[in-house]
Amino acid sequence: MPHRLLSALVAVAAYAVTLTVAAILLPGMSISWWAGIIPVLLFTVAIVVLRPLIVHLTKNVQTGPHLLTLLVGVITVFVSLLICDLILSPRLFSISGLFTWIWATLIVTIGTLIYDVVDHRLIARADRAVSNFNHRRGK
């Protein structure tokens, strides 16, 4: 399976879990159970499109790399949640209340950071497996 496809599938699954956990924990956040794939896909696309843009916009920020990574993550998640909230019907996805927005952003950011670690390890493991397979076949 190509790396990008594997990474995209893991991303959709991770964001589905993360958004669901946030919706369960936060009474001011809701995601449709029957059509939940629509907000998850929109959120995933928003993250994929926004992350490189936000990284580019923050490249001159003078801070440590870990703090900058966290800052980029928080901004990307917040804007992606905002896009979902503005575009989708409240029946599909909604966040209401300042504290709900803050907690939703933090919960989803933590989930996104966990996904990033898992994704990098999964791709590294897949690379090793393909390399070992090709080595055994004599390629």
Image (tube, rainbow, N blue to C red):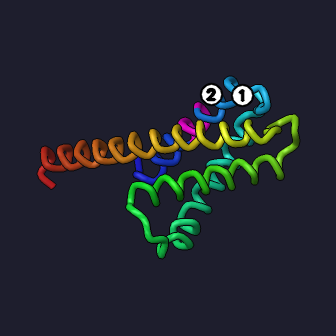
Q: Nearer the viewer, mark 2 or mark 1?
A: 1
Answer few, some or many: residues within 10 Å of disc 1's Cα (few below 14, many 20 plus, some between 14 and 19): some
Q: Residue at the location (87% across, 39% down)?
A: 90
* Mark 2 lies on residue: 21
Q: Position of residue 34 (x, y in %)?
A: 78, 27
Q: Residue at the location (62% across, 27% down)?
A: 21
Q: Closest to the observer: 29 or 8?
A: 29
Q: Quadrant of residue 28?
A: top right
- The amino acid at mark 1 is Leu
Q: Closest to the observer: 119 or 77?
A: 77
Q: Residue at the location (87% across, 43% down)?
A: 89
- The amino acid at mark 2 is Val
Q: Residue at the location (58% across, 51% down)?
A: 74
Q: Is residue 115 left or right of residue 23?
A: left
Q: Quadrant of residue 126?
A: top left
Q: Which residues are magenta?
A: 12-17
For the question of whether residue 135 can be seen, the reply is: yes
